[in-house]
């Protein structure tokens, strides 16, 4: 599936979606996760990212997967290691501070990813909407994020909102 945003080549990253249009996007790890990771797909997705309006990638992986590839494609990136999902709540302040800084920087457009785009990332980003005062309360943050990702957020993700 060829990207269709302004004639971009490559592949749009799987589950790519705007959380805050033109400022904050999310997707699964370029190339896929774990055993389903494919270098050819990763390279096609990195071509798309490098040609898109995305200016920086925030990786929340436990290791440095893809960082060398980001360098090869000229993609600015930061890795905030999240060794396990149990450690995601304690990493939230650092992650939110980084997203805040990127949102305040003129011209920066951030793509955040974990291995997959499941409940933990959805909950983390719903929590960010609340943190940034873009929504009034936790139920609204969850409802907005569920509309963005077009699926319900389960208990694991909901725990990360507040």
Image (cartoon, rainbow, N blue to C red):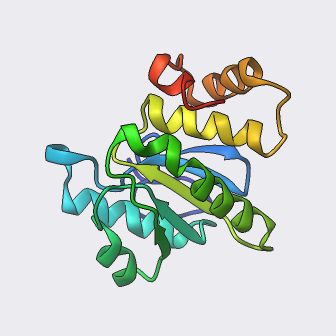
- Quick one: which residue is furthest to the left in this view? 35
Q: Relative to 134, does residue 114 appear above or below in the rendering?
A: below
- x 22%, y 62%: residue: 40
Q: Relative to 45, does residue 25 appear above or below in the rendering?
A: above
Q: Position of residue 103 (x, y in %)?
A: 75, 62
Asked which quadrant contains residue 140, the reply is: top right
Position of 5 with respect to 79 (left or right) is right
Q: Position of residue 78 (x, y in %)?
A: 49, 71
Position of 98 with respect to 100 (left or right) is left
Q: Position of residue 45 (x, y in %)?
A: 38, 60
- x 41%, y 69%: residue: 47
Q: Relative to 55, does residue 122 appear above or below in the rendering?
A: above
Q: Position of residue 51 (x, y in %)?
A: 53, 71
Q: Nearer the viewer, residue 126 or 110?
A: 126
Q: Nearer the viewer, residue 91 or 155?
A: 91
- x 72%, y 27%: residue: 141
- Quick one: which residue is furthest to the front in this view? 90
């Amino acid at each position: 599936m060829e990207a269709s945003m302004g004639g971009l080549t490559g592949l749009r990253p799987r589950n790519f979606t705007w959380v805050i249009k033109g400022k904050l996007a999310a997707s699964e790890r370029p190339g896929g996760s774990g055993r389903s990771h494919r270098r050819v797909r990763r390279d096609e997705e990195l071509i798309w990212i490098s040609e898109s309006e995305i200016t920086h990638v925030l990786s929340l992986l436990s290791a440095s997967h893809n960082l060398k590839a980001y360098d090869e494609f000229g993609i600015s990136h930061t890795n905030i290691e999240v060794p396990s999902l149990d450690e995601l709540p304690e990493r939230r302040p650092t992650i939110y501070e980084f997203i805040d800084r990127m949102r305040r920087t003129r011209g920066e457009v951030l793509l955040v990813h974990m291995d997959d785009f499941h409940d933990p990332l959805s909950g983390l980003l719903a929590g960010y909407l609340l943190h940034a005062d873009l929504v009034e309360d936790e139920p609204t943050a969850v409802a907005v994020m569920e509309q963005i990702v077009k699926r319900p957020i389960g208990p694991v993700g909901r725990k990360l909102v507040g």
